[in-house]
Amino acid sequence: MSVLVYINSNNGLYKSAFEAVTYGKKLGGDVTVITSGAADTKVLAGLGKYGAGKVLVDRSLQGDDDQQLTRIIANAVVSSGATTIIFSHDLTAKAVAPRLSVRLKAGLVSGAIEVPNGDGTIKVNVFSGKAFSSVKVNSASKIISLLPNSIQPEVSGSDCEVEEFNGNSGESKVKVLSTKKPEGEIPLPEAELVVSAGRGLKGPENWGMVEDLAKALGAATACSRPVADIGWRPHHEHVGQTGVAIRPNLYIAAGISGAIQHLAGVNGSKVMVVINTDAEAPFFKAADYGILGDAFEVLPRLTEAVKKFKSSGN
Amino acid sequence: MKILVCISKSPDTTSKIAFTDNNSKFDENGVQYIVNPYDEWYALVRALEIKESSGGNVTIITVGNANDEAVIRKALAIGADEAVRVDTDPTDAYYTAMQIAEYAKSNGFDLILAGKETINYNGSQVAGMIAEAMDLPFISLASKLDINGSTLTLEREIAGGLQVVDVNLPAVVSCAKGMAEQRIPNMRGIMAARTKPLNVIAPVAIENLTEFVAYTMPATKSACKMIDPNNMDELVELLHNEAKVI
Ligand SMILES: Cc1cc2nc3c(=O)[nH]c(=O)nc-3n(C[C@H](O)[C@H](O)[C@H](O)COP(=O)(O)OP(=O)(O)OC[C@H]3O[C@@H](n4cnc5c(N)ncnc54)[C@H](O)[C@@H]3O)c2cc1C
Ligand SMILES: Nc1ncnc2c1ncn2[C@@H]1O[C@H](COP(=O)(O)O)[C@@H](O)[C@H]1O
């Protein structure tokens, strides 16, 4: 069996790229990576450590037009003979994988959280994280889009060869006018640690203590929906059913009640800590660690404790 | 300007999720269905705003059985002009998308809008599949959509940033938060919806590429461990040694 893994290397390689290659490796067989753009060849060669046998890179495509990417990946499928194609379930995958599925008539499994079971079915998140489903693929080829932070990257080899690839990307029908990149922030869906706050924080002027804790931990920041709706925080921080779904290792929620629609976006977190003044807040039922107390006092205290812990060599 | 909006139903966001038939089927018992929030709040409302400012027609399409007519009427009450129901169960994203693409191809739409994802299956698949089947550009997860003659200007989220793009019609767009504000249907809309056309059409023969074969619920969490608010060192210690997350 041959596996093709698509990696978006436009902004460097994130952990999700190593996860996707590791996942491909775990399926058995040869793993080829396809990417495009200007990424450094040495950096791409490093994907070999996670199990890639070869990296194909199409240098002619700089952007991320999904029609062009679809053509390149489809050509890489032909050239590698792959019958399984892996994506990390990120924004690029959401644009490209469905197109590829139609082009190759390959069943698409979105949001996979595990390697396939013995019977070939693949476990995915459904109902916004409230349940799981096993998906069976009926087509000869399949596409699996892996939820970030579902498996750990594993080093199994050494650098691999990187080959220039002409994927015949064709023309683009989309004209990019501008791209704004948030500077120096950890993208929320990738973050392993997340500090989040809700209406209990009373106003945007109080977010300093949320950011201080995030900084001390090296975490990303998030918020509940009303907080983004009133404009206290930017929309891209809104997590939940109608916002971003995340599954970090640690989610700390201060002043968030834990409404079912909020939990829908965060209940994949491995560990949840809740800070709330109301013992009846529904979040306590979902959390692993609870602090019944005032976020205005607890957050600074927790920040100090984290700093102390970090300075003691951790 | 002819706009097609893809509407799906989803269980009310507070519904209890359970399964029957040996965990092979979603238990619909007592479940209240709503229009999938992304489809309603963002795709449909933005389509109506475009119609109100530059004229045209808004058709909604649902792949689903007769039980879905209640949510279809709700979308009509918000202001869509007419509805199409492809009379079949939407068994997988590919099957669903091919039904919609088939209808769209023979009816000539300028713009096809869908939601970012359904909140039950969270696949984010259908819209991109329609685009590929029709060889149209697809702008995924757009948070802003403006129209100028035959050009769309959109803001969309991409990996690590926000992109502004231009694209010529026809095109397919999936709609995320920011695109429009939720509208509550008024009495007049609800009355008018009763007499708006709802065309039921037969499905075309298409195979399923995938099947949801069995469901499981997450393991129940053990009780929350309460920590003294004055002892954050203890929490840090537990996160490090017990939970092993820092
Ligand atoms: C269709 C639909 C989709 C939705 N999607 C989302 C979604 O994606 N994401 C989302 O977040 N919500 C979503 N919601 C809204 C959701 O139902 C809740 O209304 C929302 O999550 C509440 O936000 P909150 O917890 O910040 O505010 P509140 O409910 O007002 O809770 C504030 C909490 O802070 C606590 N508090 C107050 N003061 C302090 C203090 N000093 N220290 C510590 N704690 C304090 C209070 O006890 C309370 O528990 C959705 C709703 C619907 C109907
Ligand atoms: N059965 C359906 N009928 C019509 N449109 C649908 C259907 N299922 C999904 N869609 C549309 O496709 C979008 C993405 O769905 P999904 O790929 O299931 O996440 C939804 O937000 C709808 O706009």
Image: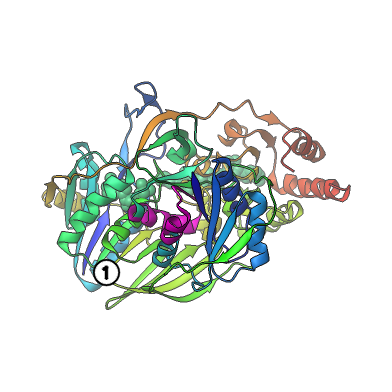
Q: For the residue carrying disc 1, how many other residues have a C-alpha within 10 Å: few (<14), some (14-19), or many (20+)?
A: many
Q: Which residue is mark 1?
A: B170
Residue type of the residue flagged with mark 1: Pro
Position of residue A18 measured from the top left corner of the image (x, y, whole percent): 62, 51
Residue B44: which quarter of the image? bottom left
Magenta segment: A74-103
Farthest right residue in view: A312
Farthest top residue in view: B22
Give A20 or B60, whichever is nearer the viewer. A20
Give A46 or A251, whichever is nearer the viewer. A46
In the figure, is residue A266 to the left or right of B28?
Answer: right
In the figure, is residue A312 to the left or right of A36?
Answer: right
> Against A139, is B221 above or below?
above
In the figure, is residue B217 to the left or right of B153?
Answer: right
Residue at 32% from the left image edge and 28% from the top image edge = B30
* Labels in figure, total: 1
Chain letter of disc 1?
A: B
Position of residue A131 measured from the top left corner of the image (x, y, whole percent): 46, 33
Q: Is residue A193 magenta?
A: no
Q: Is residue A160 visible?
A: yes
Q: Main secondary structure of the magenta part?
A: helix
Position of residue A300 measured from the top left corner of the image (x, y, whole percent): 76, 50
Which secondary structure lies at badge 1? Answer: loop
Q: Is residue A82 magenta?
A: yes
Residue at 62% from the left image edge and 34% from the top image edge = A287
Q: Is residue A222 visible?
A: no
In the figure, is residue B210 to the left or right of A204?
Answer: left
> Against B133, is A280 above or below?
above
Position of residue B195 measured from the top left corner of the image (x, y, whole percent): 10, 50
> Against B135, is A263 above or below?
above
Give A17 or B48, whichever is nearer the viewer. A17
